[in-house]
Structures are given as C-alpha cells and as structure tokens.
Image (spheres, rainbow, N blue to C red):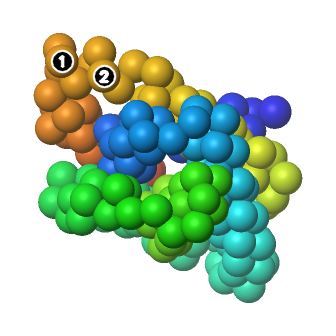
Amino acid sequence: METFLTVFALMFVAEIGDKTQLVALTFAAKFKLIWVILGLSCAFILNNLLAVALGSFIGEVLPLNLVRIAAYCLFIAFGIWTIFGSDEEENASSKVIVNQFVTVFLFLFVAEFGDKSQIAAMTFSMKYHAPIAVFLGAVAGEISANLIGIGAGVLLGKTLPIKIIKWISAVVFIAIGVTGLILTII
C-alpha cells in the first residue's frame, strides 16, 4: 500500500501543470466528456503498462544503487524538462483523427509515450519491485490529476498562471532528485 500511495502522490504531482492537462482541458471543451475521460484513461493505462513491464525487467538486471542514482537524476531531468519543455502538444489537440475517443486516446498515448510521467513509472517499477502497486498508483495518479485539471483548469487559469504551476511541479521534482541523490551517495 505504501508503494501505491507514494507512486500515486508523485505521479499526481508530476501531472499537475503538465501539458497533458492543457490538452485534456482542450479536448473537454470540444468533445463529450465521457470520450475524453475514456480516451485519456486508456492512454494512461497502456503507457503505464509498458513502462512498468520495462522497469520491472531493468530492475532485476541492474544493481539497486545504480538504479537509484539513475532514478534521481531522471527526477532532476523531469524538473528541468517541465520548465523548458516544448508546448507543441497544445496546438495538436484540435485535430480530429477518427472519432472523439480515438482522437483523445491516440493523441494522449503518443504525447505521453516517452514523456516524463511514463519514464517516472518505469523508474518507480525499477525502484520498488512491486509492479502492480506501481502500475495502479501511476494510472490512478495521472488520471486523478487530469480529471482535476479538466474540472478546475479554467478556474486556475484565471487565477494562477500555468507558468507558476509548472514551476512548482519542477521544483518538487528537482528537490526529490537532489535529496535522493544526496541520500543515496552519502
């Protein structure tokens, strides 16, 4: 349960202010909410399934200290990526591929493939050696953050600039990475 809650909380924080929330908000404004939620959920499930499977395999092959150092370096990279990442995903959300579900699913699956949250799920899988708890925590954290983003995005956008939200997420990731590296190396 501890692994699930840890992964849930960190993935939730990772998605707050992420471009995926902006894309989900855009889709929710154009499409039926049910198709946005289903497409988003299926994309996160498939991406995290792939990430956990790969992370579990790597976690069995590499020494734990090396995995920890790599994981904390990735957290620092995620923080930097959050600050300086591209905003190209926001513009692509207006294209319709086949139907609303398929559009949302394909766009978010591709947008999240190799994204910091998928790499984080893979990293958690390597670290915790509890693939089911990591998978469930990652999926629940991402979906929860995006549902909140859809529901509250308009209100937050009016009161708190997205840049501030991104900076908060970035600082949390960098702090986790730096703290983890220090504790692992010392």
Q: Quadrant of residue 95?
A: bottom left
Residue 75, position as x, y percentages in the image: 39, 57
State the residue at coordinates (29%, 15%). 155
State the residue at coordinates (77%, 72%). 53
Q: CA distance from mark 2 to mark 1?
A: 6 Å
**Pointer 2 and pointer 1: residues touching (CB < 8 Å)?**
yes
For the residue marked with disc 2, what is the amino acid? Answer: Val
Task: Give the structural element (helix, strand or loop) at label 2.
Answer: helix
Please give left or right for residue 138 compared with residue 56 in the image.
left
Graded by Cα atoms within 10 Å as few (under 14), some (14 to 19) or many (20 or more), the crowding at tag 1 reads: few
Residue 180, position as x, y percentages in the image: 43, 51
Looking at the rendering, in which quadrant would you find the C terminus?
Answer: bottom left
Residue 19, position as x, y percentages in the image: 33, 50
Which residue is labeled 2 in the image? Answer: 154
Looking at the rendering, in which quadrant would you find the N terminus?
Answer: top right
Which residue is labeled 1 in the image? Answer: 158
